[in-house]
Image: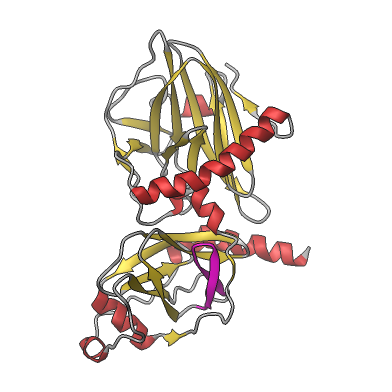
Amino acid sequence: MKNLLLIIVFITSLLFSGCTMKQDNLEVNYNAVKNYRLPVEVTDNETLVYVIRDKAFTGSAWSVWIGLNDKIIASLDAGEYTYFKVKDGINTINTVLMKHGRNYFALDKKRDKPVFIKCNIATGKFEEIASDLGMTYISKYKEVKLLPKPKPNDGYDNGNINLAMYSNLNMMIENNESIKPDQNHGVLTFIRSSDRFKVLNYSIWDDNGIVCNLDTDSFCKIRVPKGKHFYYVFSERSYVLEVDVESNENYNVKLDIGMGWAAAYTKLTPLNENTKLYRNITEVIGRDLVSSREITKTKVINFKQLRLREPIDDGVKFRISKGLKMINKTKQAVLSGTKETKKFVE
């Protein structure tokens, strides 16, 4: 029980203290750049990658695992770095904290020069930095060797089901298209309003793939054929929303994120005229506005309408194919009656 409480306190501190963190913002040291040498030989089908953990105060007392695809290859404390080579192809680099994946970075194409990525545990983001700045960091930070024997990466599957957690996939773009129901279709609007978990992002799925990734203060609209549809979100557990779509109807759903026992949890909350949530965001739902907003007692928040970027690149397609295995497994549990769904009820 004591360990569980420590986990909760730590994760809560990450989520709520990120805005007050102190980072080690170095300036380029040209002597370090001049003196840099490749630490290993790199072949024509390999890319050399440096992962640098920032000296941010928040979370600095905790070590984090570094994952490459489905293996854990290193452990980093604040102010440390490691390096490794990756083969040309689709590669995922991530951090793992207490078996939960956090920062994610896609490296799907060979690079001719070393790649330097800096992770900050409080923001949940990997940032690719310029080579000269990366060389400066590794001249100041402590090098850590890779693990003698890799371990299973507990955060790999989470990255395949929550592509919104990647820092550099850029899957969503703004969209001002008016999307309305018709005699054969209904329209679903997925909304994420302001919340205290801004650093956490999750993907919404249907049976065929990702519907959207939502930042705070954003929404997306999809037109779907009438009939029964299932929508999924995954965090520390899966959550399934069942919607019986009728023609010429609008359905409004809010992506809710809260704090669970050992990680954030997500759910899809139906909105209707009898809910407080509906009344709070009436300017977003029920209308097709190019510039939508939420009006509260204290502030006005502009909402962005988003849609998936097309065409979808090969790296994203590959990860979606991995995630669909989890979707199919969850769908079978629903159909067999071993997994409950939340039904959309007007």
Residue 71 magenta-drawn?
Answer: yes
Q: Quadrant of the C terminus?
A: top right
Residue 206 magenta-drawn?
Answer: no
**In this view, 103 is above or below 160:** below
Query: Between 194 and 321, which is closer to the camera in this rendering?
Result: 321
Residue 196 visible? The answer is: no
- Residue at 48 percent across and 33 percent down: it is 208
Q: Quadrant of residue 234?
A: top right
- Residue at 49 percent across and 62 percent down: it is 69
- x%, y% of residue 101? 54, 59
Q: Quadrant of the N terminus?
A: bottom right
- x%, y% of residue 248? 42, 10
**In this view, 293 is above or below 21:** above
Residue 38 visible? The answer is: yes
- Residue at 41 percent across and 38 percent down: it is 298
Q: Pick out the residue farthest to the right.
A: 1
Looking at the rendering, the stretch of residues picked out in magenta corresponds to 63-77
Query: Between 300 and 23, which is closer to the camera in this rendering?
Result: 23
Query: Between 240 and 10, which is closer to the camera in this rendering?
Result: 240
- x%, y% of residue 141? 40, 85
- x%, y% of residue 202? 49, 46
- Residue at 63 percent across and 49 percent down: it is 236
Q: Pick out the residue farthest to the top.
A: 183
Q: Quadrant of residue 46?
A: bottom left
